């Protein structure tokens, strides 16, 4: 009997340990992604090639979206821009909170076509950190980017689209049911 | 429990089996045989429930267009069919088999922790109830697929919360059941029965139990993270808060792939008992079987990402998971080789358990073959989420796990009930299942290769013929399972006559050394060393 109890204790420790291991996979996954450069949405890109290709012009379109329950106004100051690959460009976005409470938001970028993502290097972006807005606060925020000159020649237009989400846990309500 | 002491010279005496009767007997059951019976009946009930959902799916897919169910409801059917069959039918059925057979086969009086055993079982019906009532809550049952991928699972209605809670409960039940099995096998074997003299079924059950203890907590962690993402403001899988939905897939499949072997290894064990018995030869390559089972278990931790080739992964990672996955074909091939070599030149007879075991070997190998095809990343990206995958895992889970369970039920039914089942009806059950199974699932290979996506309630018209065929097959296969129900009830009520102590003369394991039906208490005095030695010699175990 005592032997069985000891075995029970040992196996329970393993089970609890594996429960912890499940959670340990989270930082482990983040480390792997960081080390291998996958999924680095929230970090500035490094620009190695700054040779400006004046022969080529690429249209960059800017798009801004809010998750429906976020009471902000969010818009780019210009909706589209013609740039040369390799050229350092800065654009501004206006963000204004119409809420009566402080809200923490996070913007997630996405690209159309998706293939353009790896050639679109952002050096500075409000999307790299969470943004805290007090009630009725208004801010202009920059995005600085370089389109890599290795951009495949069949891509003439890149759409940079941001979606602002309210960071869960800072709100009273929960996301609407699907 | 009443304390009874047996006279040492009457080890198999059965006149002391005092136990409560009626409902109290089952609610307070601590006897491994009673609990095994409960598990098996629970699993059968869940098998029928999951089967009804499957038939609803096939009904909708009988012809193109939407006829019977809203797409939302169809999604709930596919999700709950998977969850119920995996966690409600296959896993409890194998735990039930282990409860019934492990103490009998290793010469132990009962499972190590009898009261915990009662809890392991009685947690299951509430969990099943939670899954069932989730159909009628606002928003309906979980509809994210049985894998409960984020971000779908972080958004749905309260049906998802009920599902998460059900998975927690079933996980705790499985872990307790597994701890019981490991402790029983490691600490309570009869004197003289070394690890390498254990029947193969005990080995595969032991390794399965270890897998369960290792991975069920990881699943519990994954669904807990989904739950806190849903209600408590964490962002494990929520991109807006810096989380990543792909992480869910990694954590889930770290559980999910060993889970595949949790459902397959005990099946290997059953077949490794049945084939030698009806070939009247010892199991070929017992040692290699043990090592193959262990290596499958270890490899199962290193292949999880082959379920997610198309999610976006570096090529080196795809190659690693591809090579590791194809490597599993080696120990599995060893097993198939050993089963065939056991039958080779044996004096085979084709009773129902043997028919199901041979059916298992043929069809499981086919399922393994389509598995090797899917393991190739370049092919999988084309076939991912098509009916080819559906065909593949039904070949290994229905013709694999389920056929082995049928085999086990027919094999041990005389010991459980004390009566012989109707052999003619058993054979009919086998051929009926074998034919309609293939009519149902073989065309799905072609559908998948032609590009029909899975989990979708409608399809393009060029897929009509194969879908109609599969639907007809599924209805026939499903209703055919009532033959098994009838045959089991028939056997409980007397069958075709009393079963001898050892109805299969090729069987040389300890459970055939107790009377039929197995008395309430067995091996209260461990089997003598000479008996253990004699039997292991007959199985050629050294």
Image (cartoon, coloured by chain):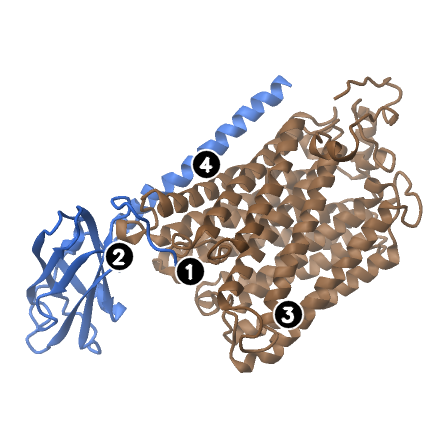
Chain colours: A blue, B brown
* Whether labels 4 and 3 share one chain: no
Residue at the location (79% across, 60% down)? B429
Q: Mark 4 points at which residue?
A: A18
Residue B497, x across and y down, in percent? 93, 46
Q: Mark 2 points at which residue?
A: A69
Q: Do the residues labelled 1 and 3 touch (CB within 8 Å)?
A: no
The front one of B205 and B57 is B57
Q: Name the residue under label 1.
A: B309
Is residue B289 at least partly visible in the picture?
no
Q: Nearer the viewer, mark 1 or mark 4?
A: 4
How far is disc 1 from disc 3 in space, using C-alphas? 24 Å
Q: On the picture, is A47 further left or further right than B430?
A: left
Residue at the location (59% across, 52% down)? B84
Q: On the picture, is B378 further left or further right than B467?
A: left
Q: Which residue lies furthest to the right in this view?
A: B497
**Chain that bears disc 1:** B
Q: Mark 3 points at which residue?
A: B442
- Check disc 1 and report its element: helix, strand or loop: helix
* Whether labels 1 and 2 share one chain: no
Residue B373's place in the image compared with B184, above or below, is below
* Whether labels 1 and 4 share one chain: no
How far is disc 3 from disc 2 in space, using C-alphas? 48 Å
Is residue B137 at least partly visible in the picture?
yes
């Amino acid at each position: 009997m005592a032997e069985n109890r000891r075995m029970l204790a040992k196996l329970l420790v393993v089970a609890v340990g594996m429960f912890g291991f499940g959670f340990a996979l989270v930082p482990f996954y983040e480390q792997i992604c960081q080390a291998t450069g996958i999924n680095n949405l929230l970090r500035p890109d490094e620009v190695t090639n700054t040779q400006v290709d004046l022969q080529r012009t690429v249209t960059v379109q800017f798009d801004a979206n809010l998750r429906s329950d976020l009471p902000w106004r969010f818009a780019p100051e210009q909706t589209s821009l013609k740039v040369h690959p390799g050229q350092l460009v800065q654009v501004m976005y206006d963000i204004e909170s119409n809420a009566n409470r402080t809200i923490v938001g996070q913007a997630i970028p996405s690209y159309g076509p998706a293939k353009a993502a790896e050639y679109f290097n952002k050096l500075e972006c409000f999307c790299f950190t969470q943004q805290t807005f007090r009630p009725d606060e208004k801010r202009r925020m920059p995005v600085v980017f370089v389109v890599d000159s290795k951009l495949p020649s069949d891509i003439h237009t890149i759409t940079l689209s941001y979606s602002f989400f309210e960071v869960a846990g800072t709100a009273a309500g929960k996301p609407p049911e699907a | 429990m009443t304390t009874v002491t047996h006279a040492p010279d009457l080890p198999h005496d059965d006149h002391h089996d005092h136990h409560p009767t009626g409902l109290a007997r089952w609610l307070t059951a601590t006897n491994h045989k009673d609990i095994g019976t409960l598990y098996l009946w629970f699993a059968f009930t869940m098998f029928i429930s999951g089967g009804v959902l499957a038939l609803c799916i096939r009904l909708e897919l009988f012809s193109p267009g939407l006829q019977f169910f809203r797409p939302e409801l169809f999604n709930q059917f596919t999700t709950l069919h998977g969850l119920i069959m995996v966690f409600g039918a296959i896993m409890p059925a194998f735990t039930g088999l282990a409860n019934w057979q492990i103490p009998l086969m290793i010469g132990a009086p009962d499972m190590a922790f009898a009261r915990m055993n009662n809890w392991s079982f009685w947690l299951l019906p509430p969990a099943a109830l939670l899954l069932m009532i989730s159909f009628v809550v606002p928003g309906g049952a979980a509809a994210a697929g049985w894998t409960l991928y984020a971000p779908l699972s972080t958004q749905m209605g309260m049906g998802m919360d009920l599902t998460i809670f059900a998975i927690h409960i079933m996980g705790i039940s499985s872990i307790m059941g597994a701890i019981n099995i490991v402790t029983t096998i490691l600490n309570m074997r009869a004197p003289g029965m070394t690890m390498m003299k254990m029947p193969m079924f005990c080995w595969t059950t032991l390794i399965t139990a270890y897998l369960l203890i290792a991975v069920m907590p990881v699943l519990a962690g994954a669904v807990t993270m989904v739950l806190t993402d849903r209600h408590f403001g964490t962002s494990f899988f929520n991109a807006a808060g810096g989380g990543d939905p792909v992480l869910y897939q990694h954590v889930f499949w770290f559980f999910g792939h060993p889970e595949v072997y949790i459902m397959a290894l005990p099946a290997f064990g059953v077949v490794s008992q049945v084939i030698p018995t009806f070939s009247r030869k010892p199991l070929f390559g017992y040692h290699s079987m043990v090592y193959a089972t262990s290596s499958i278990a270890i490899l199962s931790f290193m292949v999880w990402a082959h379920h997610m080739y198309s999610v976006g992964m570096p090529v080196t990672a795809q190659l690693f998971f591809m090579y590791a996955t194809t490597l599993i074909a080696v120990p599995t091939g060893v097993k198939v080789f050993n089963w065939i070599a056991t039958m080779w030149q044996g004096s085979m007879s084709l009773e129902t358990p043997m028919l199901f075991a041979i059916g298992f070997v043929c069809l499981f190998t086919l399922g393994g073959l389509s598995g090797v095809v899917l393991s190739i990343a370049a092919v999988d990206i084309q076939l991912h989420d098509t009916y080819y995958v559906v065909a593949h895992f039904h070949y290994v889970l229905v013709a694999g796990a389920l056929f082995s369970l049928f085999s086990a039920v027919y094999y041990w039914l005389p010991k459980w009930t004390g009566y012989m089942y109707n052999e003619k009806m058993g054979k009919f059950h086998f051929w009926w299942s074998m034919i309609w199974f293939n009519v149902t699932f073989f065309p799905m290979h072609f559908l998948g290769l032609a590009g029909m996506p899975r989990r979708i309630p409608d399809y393009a018209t060029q897929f009509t013929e194969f879908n109609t065929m599969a639907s007809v097959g599924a209805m026939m296969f499903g209703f055919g399972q009532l033959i098994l129900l009838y045959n089991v009830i028939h056997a409980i009520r007397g069958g075709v006559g009393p079963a001898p102590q050892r109805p299969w003369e090729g069987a040389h394991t300890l459970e055939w050394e107790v009377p039929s039906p197995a008395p309430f208490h067995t091996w209260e005095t461990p089997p003598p060393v000479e008996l253990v030695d004699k039997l292991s010699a007959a199985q050629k175990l050294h």
